[in-house]
Image (cartoon, rainbow, N blue to C red):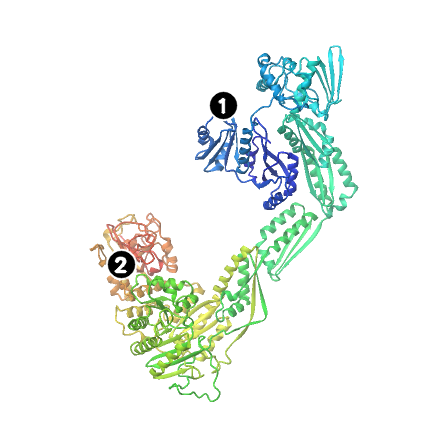
Amino acid sequence: MANRELTKLWLSHKEEYILVIKNIPQKVTDETLHNYIEVISKVDVDHLYFHSPTNGEKVRQVALVHLKEKIADISSVKEKAKKKPIEGQVVHIDLLNNPSGIIVFDIPREATQDEIELYFDRSQIAGVGAEVESCTLQEKVQIAVLFYKSLDSVLENIFKSRHKIRGKDLTVEPYYDAFHGEVIAALKGMETNGHHGHYLTMIERKSGYESMNIRKVEESIEIRKDNVGNRTSNSSIRILSADMTEYEDDEGYQMPLASGGGDERKDFEKQKQKKFTETTRSEHIYSEINEEDLPPIPATPRPSVKRSEVADGYSEKINMDKGKIILLKIRGFSKECAACQIDLNSDKDEITFIGSQDVVMAAKLCMYQCLEESVEETKYVSKGFAAILKEKSSWIKDTLKKEKIHAYCTLKDDNLLCCQAFSKPLAEKGIKTIMANLEKVEIPYNEGHFKYVNSKEWTDLVSKLKNQNKVEVEMNKDKKLIVVTGKKGDFQTAKDLIKRELNKHAEAKSEKIEIKGSKSVCFHHGMQDKLEKIKTDISKRNGSLQYKHDPRKQTTVIEMKGDSAIVEDKKAEISQLVAAIWQGSVDLQKISNKGNDPAIMSRSLDSSSGKKFLSTFEEKHKCGIEIERKKDSTHDLHPVKPLPVVHGAEKPDLQRRNTTPDFGGARPKQPQQDGHSNFSSYRIDQLEIILKEGNIVHERSGVLVNVVAAGENNFNKSRITQAFMRKCGPEFEQKYVQAKKGEETRSVIFTDKSPGLKCREVCHLEIPKWTGDKSILYKAIRDCLRQCSIRNHDCVAFSAVGTGQLLKYPVHEVVNCLVSEAKVTAQRSKCITKIKFVIFDSATVGAFKEKLDRLSESVIYDRHRHDSLPSDSKEAIGSKDGSDRPKLTVQAISVELFAVSKAEGEKIRKILSKEIKDTFLFEEDYKHDKIKSISKETWKKMTSAAMKDHVWIEKDRDTLTFKGQKDNVKGTKTQILEILLNDKTDSHAVSPSGRNSNHQSGNKKGTPGYWLQQCDEADVPAYWKHFQGYLRQIISKGKGAILGDKAKRVTIGSEDPMYKNIIQLVIKTWDAAKVGHGADAKNLSHSSINVTKIERIENYGLFDKYLTTKKKFYRRLADGKTCTALEKVYAGGNKISSGPIKTAHRSMTADLDLASYANEHWFFHGTSDQYVDNIINKGLDDRLGGDKGMFGRGIYAAESSTKADQYADESSSKRQNKDRKMLLTRLLLGNMYVTKEAKQFKTPPCADCLKTDCTKGHHTLFDSVVADGKWLFREFIVYRSEQCYPEYLITYDRVR
């Protein structure tokens, strides 16, 4: 290989084709190693590479093997190598890794390590930014290894040019540790043994006289050195190197001996003179060596010698192998002996020497010594290659001459290519050059070609190719291959001709592949790109592919026509694609197994809408989904839960607990209530107490009470908390931790309900372990009930508080506490009408029952003693016992998913499960007092509407729960609300929020109860024309969404008091002196404005979002937190605002439904005509604020109409005076951050640490930013669109 072989390897990035072979026995030849690797790896070897120093022997302990193909499994090759030694020695095989540095050879001995490192650290050499990490110089062998921080760019730069140090050329290669590490070790060993870097003299090389005493001869040379002197080109014997360039005759070539020849000639003479000085012998030396000192010539091989006397002296003929004679010619041997006439006759395989006997003897000795330097490399070639080489022997000679390779190649034993040269690398290069100019290709054929390849036409074509193109054509019928071999120039034409004729005479083949079911759907959606590639490949071979997918029948048919080979190949490829499709089931029970959920999903997915959903999902996610009905497996789906009996309508007469009801016959079997097997109901004053045996986490109530052990990290240690965690997951604890922040001293914490719970809120009671002090328990229960009353909850559910093994409260103490506090609640609270005790074990239930029996005025129902119907239980429509309760039998289904791969399938399965749940188990509640008293006729209409749309509906007291496909739920809800609206059943007076007004009176302004009442009653303003009444709001909202008409514009007449209020607000806040001043007021010079029109924007969807935020502010006020008015904001004891908000007084006195305690006020916002429609339909969007805003991207508002007027044009350069627009908006400022400096905010800063990047979870942010500094106008900014509602659109003209 060339010196730059490894550099070329790195540039090609084909390390994955290279094996590193270590521990190679010395006896192993290249051919043997070549064959061994092919046997072990089952892959053809391209060539071998050994490291060859510039002046030394090849390192054979380690080699690189370049393969023609990648090895699929290197581990199996390693195992085979261990089991199959070569020459009794196990070799080590591994893949070549990427280079880790560079290695430098041929370093001058005087060069130092620092000198080398500094040279290769320069940016001109290694590139800008390159940095040498380490440099190691192996001084014995003058090799350096360097490592860089970033290697790839370094290698690209280093290999662009040649390198010299101290005038000597360096050899630089990529450093492969697995290979070069062994090379360096081997070279060090050779140096130690005295072999590396020494040129062995000709006398030292063994000739046929192997037993010659070399040491003796060397000593003779040293003794007579002065007498010999340095020989010149006029000496009787001259030794030339093998580096010749011209032919001597038709078979050999040499460098001309005449003077001249340029640099090449000078180098040649220099090398020749050096070698001559070291090795030439004179007649004086030979005269001291007697014939008896020379050992006999070995018997094998022994060339025949003919001696004779001639007129001029002595002559001798020697029979010699033709190859060796040609090597001597190449070397120019016959012209090196001036005193001896030498005839090298390769035709007769003989050499003739004529001259004196001493001269002939010296010439012969020199010849044998020359031939001792010759080496032979061999390679077995295929039958086709052998035939080409036999016919083209002259081509071999011409090829070697052209490439200037001084070697002789010939074919022996029919298929053994031999190359002789004066060095091993040269002989190897000769073999490789010849092989590189030969080429072989295997052309596959198939059944469609059988007729043609067995015809006379094919035989004639083969003969033509052999005679005209000089190629060999062989048939391998077992493998169905046509093997074509030839010289590169002749080969390509023959190969193209054979392929063309095969395509021409191929019989077309047709194949049909049919894929059925959901696999075909998956194939259709997920394999289109691969199928297109297959179609292109077939088209290139003059074939065709037809593809048809029938989505209705779920079948895919692929028809291929064309050459048999390509059709068979692509059929196998398509079959592999189909076989690779992954199949997995989607378990509906794992999606949700609660109640009717599996039945709802089964019915929905098996419906037309479900199939449409699945079809859309398949196309979007490139998969297939198969729905199959399970045999002998059904679900009982109750589309509605039964209607509770109206109190007083059909309630059993159970005024005393010992009274037995009279049903006029057999008592009906009672359904269980919420999954509880035993329960009793009691009445104390207006309070109903229900005692149940069961698990509280399944109970439906306004508030569920959880018990937490006091102390850090004790949250999930109680059994009741663990039950909640199992039901709700980690979100349950997260909500508690968040609510607890800042309230560490409180023992009663409220959180919103978590998923899976049937309540509005959860109350967490934090109590310590039992110490005998029962006042702690009483205080906690009392605080809990008081807070529930303040929060307007009508039902509270307790467990057996603290009676478990963790807290160890005595059962009788807990019973006494809960029952007595319940009795107090019955006397004091008007909100709480029901308390539930849900007890897990029957023993504790008995203790509660005994206490309640003694205390209560009446037992409404006792499940422990009777089987009659309780007053608040559920009964089916149409009968008292629920026997004809509407029910559907739904066929259970299995869902199978098909995807292009397992990884993709697992990913799609998760997405499908989530979308099925979100789409078909969509749940929505609607609460209203009127629901409590609906008639049976109305209820039947509701259930009929629900069943029609496959929606499951449940009624519990004043709440309707809808569940089913999202679109169906929305439609059903609208229909049912219309039914409810038209129901003529008399009911209590109802507030817009749905609560009885008698529960919402008597709360003093500013108290927690008052704020919670305000939160409950928060609704659209009473002066709105549209969306009045809670039911009408929902209906209008639903219909508005369908019609796309979200916002209503209501023109305010001049006689309306609201019109006058707004006019006054504009006039009072107008400042003519500031018109035209400021960066945003360019080109403004008018003195005032004249309002021409005022419109109210009634957008319920937008206002509902604003209302939700407003309720949060109310709840914050109920929790005792306040919002400071702007004029009362202090910092460091100093007032930092310039006064109250200018629009605040006007807003408060105009009775405009503004919550001033939450700092809700009206503000102006100027805008151009093009944005008006978007704002009134979608609202002001904080995300669309400009990045150049002085206080960040937010919604900016002004207390001055003058300020808003500046922004009423498209730009300051396009000012207009007519029909300008500004908005009068509600803004919820809450807690305001007042700043006197311009600063970019993403959100208001932290209210605790005043940082804009606060990461502490228990800290809270300000709600808004007020810019109150040395500016012309104050600015009010909120950073959430839900804090702003544009309520009025003011149209005006500018007046000069």
**Residue 167 image label:** 1
Compared with residue 160, is residue 565 higher up or lower down, i.e. above or below? Answer: below
Comparing 1074 with 292, the one in front is 292
The kind of secondary structure element at disc 2 is helix
Query: Could you say where residue 800 lies in the image, as x and y percent from the top left?
Result: 37, 74
Mark before the other along the chain sequence, 1 or 2? 1
Can residue 244 be seen here? no
**Residue 1066 image label:** 2
Compared with residue 199, is residue 1053 higher up or lower down, i.e. above or below? Answer: below
| Pair 1/2: label in front | 1
Q: Residues within 10 Å of mark 1 (few under 14, many from 20)?
A: few
Residue 327 occupies quadrant: top right
Comparing 120 with 848, the one in front is 848
The kind of secondary structure element at disc 1 is loop
Residue 182 occupies quadrant: top right
Q: Residues within 10 Å of mark 2 (few under 14, many from 20)?
A: many
Quadrant of the image for the N terminus? top right
Compared with residue 1075, is residue 1230 higher up or lower down, i.e. above or below? Answer: below
Residue 209 occupies quadrant: top right
Label 1 amino acid?
Gly
Label 2 amino acid?
Val
Comparing 497 with 910, the one in front is 910
Q: How many marks?
A: 2
Query: Could you say where residue 142 lies in the image, as x and y percent from the top left?
Result: 51, 28
Relative to 256, is 1267 on the left or the right? left
